Image: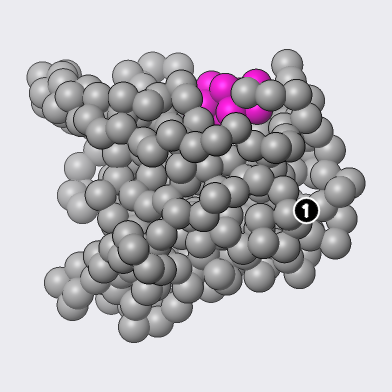
């Protein structure tokens, strides 16, 4: 991860051209039409949300679940419902394991309802403009606003059939903001993102924040601790928010502390699920249906 902010226009054009090609790659596995409406779960943020966990096990731990599907944000299956097994089709197709599929498997097992994942993360992105991307809801100048792109993806998933409902946002992000965004500014931006999502989809929408890799927080840029503190304190500023600590000794390598490995991603998915279960599942039948605008 670099410490630079937004790139020059030429570098942005080069990067966006490469990513445009990547977005057309891959095709999801078709699935039968779900027998009932979906519980929709959106996965937003940067690389750990995108899925960077080394150790993909397609035939075992990461095998498809018949009731876990995805609404791809990229690939040749974009605009259709396909299997929700890792690697997911985020803003660009992932190549590794994330936490969203594990969360979704646990959710459908508990509720008996099919789950539709909206994978909308992109690596090395932040609230600060970087490489022509931003998550800042108020930013109207940066080339691509990922917050608004995520809204379109969520709207598309909700519109696939009557009765679909958005039941959770899973957020994992902050690493790229560490060298670029003071904690006070990060607080404002994160709260505005939560407020914007709830203004569109319902004031009681659960929002879960996964912790950045603990060892990276401790060994990296000093502002890591500050951004982590913002994450931890979000529940004091906004209701129906849960901060979920991440597992230790679960990173890809000593030279890549920033990314959870596959086992760490699955464990984080289980922890996110446990937090959702303990705080929100008891009232899941009362989660408001999205208030489309």
Residue 126 in percent (x, y) is at 38, 42
Q: Measuring 19% from the left and 74% from the top, which residue is drawn there? A: 253
Q: Circle 1 — which element?
A: loop
Segment colored magenta: 150-159
Residue 152 in the magenta stretch? The answer is yes
Which secondary structure dominates the residues rendered in magenta? helix
Q: Is residue 235 left or right of residue 125?
A: right
Q: Nearer the viewer, residue 13 or 53?
A: 53
Q: Residue 94 is drawn in which quadrant?
A: top left
Kindly give the residue lying farthest to the front in the view shown. 32
Residue 249 in percent (x, y) is at 34, 83
Q: Measuring 47% from the left and 73% from the top, which residue is drawn there? A: 267
Q: Measuring 38% from the left and 17% from the top, which residue is drawn there? A: 141
Residue 14 in percent (x, y) is at 11, 23
Instruction: For label 1, count other residues whose C-alpha is less than 10 Å away and answer few (under 14), some (14-19) or many (20+).
Output: few
Q: Is residue 256 left or right of residue 249?
A: left
Q: Is residue 113 left or right of residue 283?
A: left
Q: Which residue is mark 1?
A: 239
Residue 177 in percent (x, y) is at 37, 49
Task: Please determine whether, in this image, residue 285 is positioned above or below residue 129.
Answer: below
Q: Is residue 67 visible?
A: yes
């Amino acid at each position: 991860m670099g410490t630079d902010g937004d790139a020059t226009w030429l570098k942005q054009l080069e990067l966006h051209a490469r990513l445009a090609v990547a977005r057309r790659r891959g095709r999801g596995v078709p699935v039968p039409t779900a027998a009932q409406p979906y519980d929709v779960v959106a996965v937003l943020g940067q690389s750990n949300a995108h899925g960077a966990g080394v150790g993909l096990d397609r035939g075992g731990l990461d095998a498809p679940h018949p009731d876990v599907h995805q609404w791809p944000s990229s690939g040749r299956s974009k605009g259709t419902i396909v299997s929700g097994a890792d690697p997911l089709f985020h803003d660009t197709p992932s190549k590794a394991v994330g936490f969203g599929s594990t969360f979704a498997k646990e959710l459908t097992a508990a509720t008996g309802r099919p789950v539709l994942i909206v994978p909308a993360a992109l690596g090395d992105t932040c609230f600060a403009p970087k490489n022509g991307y931003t998550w800042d809801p108020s930013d109207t100048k940066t080339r691509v606003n990922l917050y608004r792109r995520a809204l379109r993806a969520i709207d598309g998933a909700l519109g696939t059939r009557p009765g679909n409902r958005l039941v959770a946002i899973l957020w994992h992000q902050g690493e790229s903001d560490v060298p670029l965004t003071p904690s006070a500014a990060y607080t404002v931006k994160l709260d505005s993102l939560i407020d914007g999502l709830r203004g569109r989809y319902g004031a009681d929408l659960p929002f879960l924040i996964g912790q950045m890799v603990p060892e990276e927080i401790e060994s990296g840029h000093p502002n890591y601790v500050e951004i982590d503190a913002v994450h931890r304190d979000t529940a004091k500023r906004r209701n129906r928010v849960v901060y979920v600590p991440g597992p230790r000794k679960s990173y890809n390598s000593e030279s890549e502390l920033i990314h959870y490995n596959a086992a760490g991603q699955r464990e984080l998915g289980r922890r996110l699920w446990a937090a959702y279960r303990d705080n929100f599942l008891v009232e899941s039948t009362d989660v408001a249906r999205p208030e489309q605008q």
